[in-house]
Image: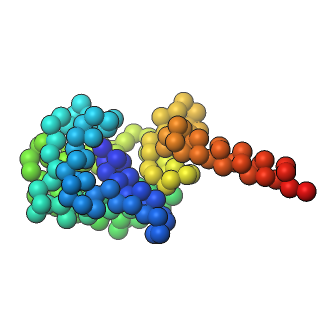
Amino acid sequence: MALDVANSVVLRHDETRRIDRFETSAQLEAFPEAAAAFCAERELFADMVAPAPQNRRNFLELREATDGYFRARVSGDNDDQLLADLLEALARTLRGANGANGLDAATAHSVLRLLAMPDPDRMKICRNCGWLFIDRSKNRSRAWCDMAVCGNRAKASRHYRRRKEEEAP
């Protein structure tokens, strides 16, 4: 859940093509239903509701702190300030959450599970889209968040470049 929320900003690294999936209230209102259907932790968070309007700022701050902390951790930067920012965002979110069935509380609990993850080296950043993901492959060699989307795009791009080089005189 926490990574799905952090990844709600598409192409975060590209300011010109960046898309925030929570830009409007309607998008944020629709997210709990999608998360309940597709999230890896869906059985833990049944009947979720979007954060109350007065709590959305805390929720979005939690999203940004989650992304910042885990992205730095994957990159090998153990910044205590980023961890402190994340813990403060967690506390604010949990204090203002709409109870146990709120998306904000569910995300905060998911972040806590990620912090306690037994093998933090399994978290990676997708080489194509920049999303955070957990590599559950046996040999820890996964490079893309989703082979059907990002892996296919990367392989198609590599194939296209090779063909162009072969055709060049």
Q: Residue at point 24% right, 60% down?
A: 24
Quadrant location of the C terminus in the rendered image = bottom right
Name the quadrant of the N terminus: top left
Viewed as shown, does residue 53 lie left or right of 1? left
- Residue 118 shows up from this direction: yes
Number of numbered discs: 0
Query: Is residue 20 depicted above or below 147 in this figure?
Result: below
Q: Residue at x 31, y 38 (%)?
A: 39
Q: Quadrant of residue 84?
A: bottom left
Front residue of 95 and 163: 163
Query: Percent x, y for residue 38?
Result: 32, 36
- Residue 118, compared with residue 92, is above or below; it is above
Q: Residue furthest right?
A: 169
Left or right, residue 164 beside residue 112: right
Question: Residue at the location (38% across, 52% down)?
Answer: 7
In percent of width and height, residue 51 lies at 15, 53
Residue at x-position 35% and y-position 54% = 8
Residue 107 image position (x, y, % from top left): 24, 48
Q: Is residue 83 visible?
A: no
Expressed as whole percent of the image width and height from the top left, the position of residue 47 reads 15, 37
- Image position of 83 (left or right of 145): left
Nearest to the observer: residue 42 or residue 164: 164
**Colour logic:** rainbow
Residue 81, compared with residue 38, is above or below; it is below
Which is nearer the eye, 120 or 44? 44
